[in-house]
Amino acid sequence: MTSSGDALASARALILTPHGRDSRLAAALLTEVGQASQICDDLDAFVSGLGEDTAFGILTEETVRHADLAPLLAAISAQPNWSALPFIVLTRHGGGPERNPEAARLSEILGNVTFLERPFHATTFASVVRGARRGRERQFETRAAVMQLHRSDETLRTALMAGRLGAWELHPASRELICSPTLRTIFGRPADGTFDFHDFVSSIHEDDLDRVMATIENATIEGRDYAVEFRTVWPDGSLHWAEAHARIQHDPDGTPRLIGVTSDVTARKQAETNHREQTEELERRVAQRTAELESAHARVLEEIRQRERTEGQLLQSQKMEAIGQLTGGVAHDFNNLLMAVLGNLDLLSRHVTDDPRAARLIDGAIQGAQRGAALTQRLLAFARRQELKIEPRGLADLVRGSEDLLRRSVGDGVELSFSLPDGLPPAQVDGNQFDLALLNLAVNARDAMPGGGRLAIAVDLCEATGDEDLAAGRYLRLSVSDTGLGMDAATLEQATQPFFSTKELGKGTGLGLSMIHGLAQQLQGALRLWSRPGEGTRAELWLPVAQVEEKGAERPAPPPATAQASRGVLRILFVDDDALIAMSSVDLLEDLGHHVTQAGSGEQALAVLESDAEIDLMITDFSMPRMNGGELSRHARDLRPDLPILLATGYAELPEGGMIDLPRLAKPYMQRQLEEEIARMGL
């Protein structure tokens, strides 16, 4: 809140003395006494400048003698009650009506006016100004007090309304009752209606009336505080509760009066009654409630355990995803290294045919690189980033096709049995990856039975209801059960983690089960394990039932892998940002007799296509900076819609929605695979 002194300091004095040097002289004298001022050019400007924050006005008598003073009178009449704006009128005839009849008219219009006869001394002018300032400062103090009082009243009204409190004042001697609208509503009356002492008495429940009237009398006679709770009966007959508090005050003549507030406490009373009834009911049922609470406590503990299990599974999933991303990236880079190694070894093997020892060494190196490629496939399977050829396949037929390999792998010490019923629907699966997963499960079972045992492999049709690891639907289930050593709970929990193995050093990579787990996840299925020490292990691979195409919608048969190239020597654009891969792959292509143009990025490849219309085939890596192989393929098809494109990729984690349908060549590849893929494209 601004103080009166602050308000006066910011107020300006208005000066209307348009003739001679009066205005400049008045402004200079005001500056000397510390008063800000504003010189007005005419009466209209003077009137428009008048306001609550004006300090006072100075004007000459001759300026307003013949002017229309109606606007000035209207501005003065519009002042708030606390304001009586001071005016100083400079006159040449004094201020008395006997000497200056015009002064009477100005006094009536201006109200708070002081006449100063010219010529005047500066000291006299300063004294008159100070008097006007003091008067205006007292008015500002009055304004501040009025505003404070208004805020206090508003705060009180707001507090009463917020608290649903009805204010009232009772004069016991005269039975005069003054009340607020809220009080009327507390007694069931309209807020804008009437409510006197008789209405008050008639509203009190007959059983509480004597007690209320006695409380009023005691408060009046003995000066005690008035505090009472009582029942009220509304005009509609409904019963309510009220609580009243008041204090005695005395008028100047000594007459007492009660000033207080009343609130509706019906809800509280009902709550107290309900609470009392509920307490009595609870006391009667304490044994039953205790049993229920114990049961609820047990359920809460089970929910906590379930939540902890869920949180653990989520943490494990997040950890596996992080490891999978790292593993997939490492495997992809390793694939690129193997690509360079295999490509160069493949070419080198053609030049040492007359050196058996060198040929044997190169063949050993190729086999080692191919084993490394197989390892990367396991890593990519775990990371769910290997390229899958998913199609409807009969699991029973796949198992039958692997029977000989399985028998050789598990050895004579393991009794192998199969349960492969006919008529099962096909599963949505990659046949090669399924064979690898089945072989891994069988080998793990064999290693868990060092003294021999029984291994049972079965395929059946199951229904999932939509639990934590499988969506609802039909699934083909491959079960591999052994009678081996089994695993405890701690080992079973870690069994699908990458690089975890219970085998001796050098006898396992720890990627078998994690690879199968990754494959199942990628195929929208699941891997489930059950095991106990001494009771063996059962592994179940759940794969979704395939959606078989309707009859008549046969797919066109792909061209045979051994098809011969029909166009002879090709002009090939090879795109890869890895210099080692590019060098070895270009050598492989040129060794096949093709002419090869090399590009190290998508931008360079597009520049070649724009300048050379004779390119017959583009072979591009997928994972490249700035522009990947998919984006390059789309831009290339914009330039050459009929351009054959072969996409070389180390794994199948390609962005959704952005890939066009292209033939793919899996890295690492050798010259024979490269030649077959080109032939398969009909080139």
Image (cartoon, rainbow, N blue to C red):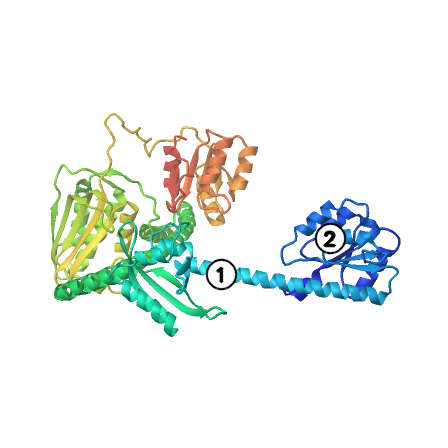
Q: Residue at x 39, y 30 (%)?
A: 682
Q: Residue at x 31, y 52 (%)?
A: 382
Which corner quadrant of the image does residue 116 belong to?
bottom right
Query: Counting residues from the N terminus, which is met first, the one under dot 2 or under dot 1?
Result: 2
Q: Is residue 397 left or right of residue 175?
A: left
Q: Position of residue 497 (x, y in %)?
A: 29, 59
- 113 and 267: which is toward the camera: 113
Amino acid type at circle 1 is: Thr
Q: Is residue 185 left or right of residue 151?
A: left
Q: Is residue 263 left or right of residue 639?
A: left
Which corner quadrant of the image does residue 84 belong to?
bottom right
Q: Is residue 138 left or right of residue 298?
A: right
Amino acid type at circle 2 is: Glu
- What is the quadrant of the C terminus in the image? top left
According to the picture, the residue beneath numbered tag 1 turns out to be 155
According to the picture, the residue beneath numbered tag 2 turns out to be 108
- 586 and 375: which is toward the camera: 375
